[in-house]
Image (cartoon, coloured by chain):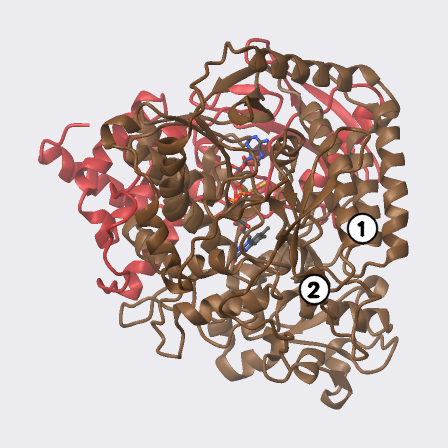
Amino acid sequence: MNLTLRVWRQKSPQEPGRIVDYPVTGIIPDMSFLEMLDVVNEGLIAKGEEPIAFDSDCREGICGTCSIVINGRAHGGQKGTTACQLHMRHFQDGQTITVEPWRAKAFPVLRDLVTDRGAFDRIIQAGGFVSVNTGGTPDANCLPIGKAESDLAMDAAACIGCGACVAACKNASAMLFVSAKVSHLSLLPQGEVEKDQRVMSMVTQMDKEGFGNCTVTGSCEAVCPKEISLDFIARLNREYGVSLLKGVQA
Amino acid sequence: MNLDSKIPSGPLAQKWDKHKFDLKLVNPANKRKFDVIVVGSGLAGASAAATMAELGYQVKCFCFQDSPRRAHSIAAQGGINAAKSYQNDGDSVYRLFYDTIKGGDFRAREANVYRLAQVSVNIIDQCVAQGVPFAREYGGLLSNRSFGGAQVSRTFYARGQTGQQLLLGAYQALSRQIGLGAVKMFPRTEMVDLVVVDGAAKGIVVRDLVTGELSTHAADAVVLATGGYGNVFFLSTNAKGCNVTATWRAYKKGAVFANPCYTQIHPTCIPVSGDHQSKLTLMSESLRNDGRVWVPKQKGDTRKPDQVPEAERDYFLERKYPSFGNLAPRDIASRAAKEVCDEGRGVGPGGLGVYLDFADAIKRLSEETVRERYGNLFDMYEKITGENAYRAPMRIYPAVHYTMGGTWVDYNLMSSLPGLFVIGEANFSDHGANRLGASALMQGLADGYFILPYTIGNYFATSKTAKVKADHPEFKKALESSQALAKRLLSINGKRTVTSFHRELGKIMWEKCGMARTKQSLTEALTLIPALRAEFWKNVKVTGENNSLNQDLEAAGRVADFLEFGELLCRDALTREESCGGHFRVEHQYPDGEAKRDDEHFAFVSAWEYQGPDKPPILNKEPLVYEEVHMSTRSYK
Ligand SMILES: Cc1cc2nc3c(=O)[nH]c(=O)nc-3n(C[C@H](O)[C@H](O)[C@H](O)COP(=O)(O)OP(=O)(O)OC[C@H]3O[C@@H](n4cnc5c(N)ncnc54)[C@H](O)[C@@H]3O)c2cc1C
Ligand code: FES
């Protein structure tokens, strides 16, 4: 396959970026999108040009490191698929493909397609955990948990923290990410104990980081590679409301 | 070198309890006077950093990913073992211990393995308390599955994302400590050297991967939890960033490296599809619970799988190993697959593949049940290959997956360098020559949550070394040599890319030191690798500059280390004149092709000691003494 890539190049957070066109030849349909970028980079390095910086690690769709917008869609828009699991057989020969970084105030571009998603870590640090220390925990089977609740908690826990939800949202809202963690933990008896405090702390941090409001357009759910459901946002809103009523402070 | 494993005396079952009692404690108020550096935020690193911070130590944690949550542990699929014996099927701490020792082909340290089996039960309790959503039965209790090398059901799992859920549990515990200010986290920061002062590890040199800035950090102890070295083969199931840099540079500073030739080839991976391939993808071992492995009986049979009648299929694992069948351990299953492919009976492009067939399971259980158990794996298979495994069998082939070797550590998980502790896949201690499925997650969390936090206290309480600060001359020296290394890599300006060297090294390793090793192939590798390394230092092209985000430079540093490490791996494989676990020397096999171990001459840990750039390393031997188990020939027939 031959393609034209239009790629966002930006040397540093301080410098302005721009789109640069690269003709690409000899792509095989079995390659993943990132393997295609590897080929482009090998060509650039051979010419002494700097390769396109992009993040990836597991290349199996689970670590959440890869984070690129392909033709205007976070991760390329294929249902339930991260960019590293998107394969070239889904593109046409001769196609022009635009490749950009996540765009959100809270995720500044570091270089080319690499952004800083530290804001997500800080939201978890604010309250996305169960406050237990190591040791002294009861036997794992002492508390039966219904399969349905446990499965639902797992649906929420499947979030890989990639940030596609933010990148896809016109308001750059992080509600899907935050709701996934809030729901995962509050659905389980172990996490339920701290649920009022957790939701308040996490939402407050989310606002501090500069993420936008949720207007329930559903674009986050549509691009989420783990197909995290919008229902969790409704749950988050309910829990937040209860916490507010109880006067919980962040 | 005198390698003292510090195994406590007394009966096996009481060693750990007795040792815990004998360990000196640090008074709670004094704990904050001790600084600990943890390099790595995978299961081992994150759990250790969080737990030590909870105890009151001052912790700094480093990882090269942009967030600690993305460490390679996240990718583990199948599950985690624990001797909970919830299934009432005859499991016990002793059985898990025995299965692990046997699975490791009697090349692991008995006392460590017993302790691992003991603390396994605490891990599950801890994880459930953190909110890890393990799979459950309708009655609300935890569910289990079986894994290779075991005849009981003791594997806990969270769909096909067990590693993810366990890591998120540890990451959340770590995040809590970061939020409390008890851990200072440095993501996108790579350790490039270890600083040793008066014979003890006292700090590290790191590169900030965003700004390129090199800096030093001092501490009272350094913990490496930097994962395995499978990527020395270039193609492996490991994440792209996995590397040997931290433990390799520690090796060059005096921490001996044990059993590098013990590498695990996993039987069920998606076959290579072409030269562009950047990594290989695992299809979890759990699939072998319900999938049946077969190839056509005839050579060169090109019929579609559904056109090969039952009588013309060879279910070779069930045939050769009737009592374990498709659940034979990994090394055995991989070699069996290689054998049938070598006989010309492999399937798919190039004949490098065997079928993993779910037709019977779908008939027996329904497609729905199979989907519930393995849906995400089937989806992943379809994404990568474009094929639907509910309709036609998967094609699988062995691939490099895990490395049992690693930095040598004693019973306290301390390396031969005082003050340097090594945990998780990065150390060598628990899996011998072959690791059983679902035991790496167990070991990482055992080390991090339940072992290191105790043993490190004893080091602080008894160590006589002086506290040093980062203005000590050794820090300056290490910093300057790291700067010089980066400069040198950037100034070569040759003609070949870093990846091309890495690919070539991987090819040498796979062909000469992969599933079948011979004296000749290893001797060849030992001339090819130094030649490739010499070319690297003359002809590599690394673009960009040091003082910015430069992924080409990051890769160059890692490949430079692999080019040295690969040689040690082959040297170790050449020295070990026996076959055991993942190390198969063609010269040493029984007439039926099974591995022939040589306990008389090789029941020891090979611990390699660095002697300088142009001198061969020294081989130290730690004898393996079995007080409790009898070293038998491993049989899964
Ligand atoms: C695809 C796959 C599936 C698996 N499935 C299972 C399973 O089902 N059950 C099981 O028990 N095991 C499984 N394993 C094995 C298991 O996942 C690993 O052995 C285990 O997770 C390793 O954990 P760790 O904490 O030692 O290292 P890792 O998780 O690899 O973490 C290494 C850490 O070190 C950091 N690091 C490395 N080098 C540096 C450096 N120089 N500077 C700074 N930081 C550095 C990294 O950033 C990372 O944070 C699987 C492995 C793979 C590849
Ligand atoms: S690289 Fe891990 S999810 Fe894409």
Q: At x 59% / y 74%, what residue is drawn?
A: B327
Vertical arrangement, residue B226 with respect to residue A100, above or below: below
Circle 1 crowding by C-alpha within 10 Å: few under 14, some 14–19, many from 20: few
Residue B208 percent coordinates (x, y): 56, 19
* Horizontal relation, residue B605 to residue B215: left or right: right
The span from disc 2 to disc 1 (Cα, nearest Å) is 31 Å
Whether residue B317 is visible to the viewer of this picture, yes or no, is yes
The answer to which of B255 and B148 lies nearer the viewer is: B255
Q: At x 85% / y 77%, what residue is drawn?
A: B301
Q: Which residue is mark 2?
A: B580
The answer to which of B369 and B341 lies nearer the viewer is: B341
Farthest residue in the bottom direction?
A: B311
Ligand 1 has an atom within 8 Å of the beta carbon of the residue at disc 2: no
Label 1: which secondary element: loop
Q: Quadrant of ligand 2?
A: top right
The chain whose colour is red is A
Subunit bearing disc 1: B
The answer to which of A232 and B626 lies nearer the viewer is: B626
Label 2: which secondary element: loop
Nearest-to-viewer mark from 2 and 1? 2
The chain whose colour is brown is B
Q: Quadrant of the C terminus of chain B?
A: bottom right
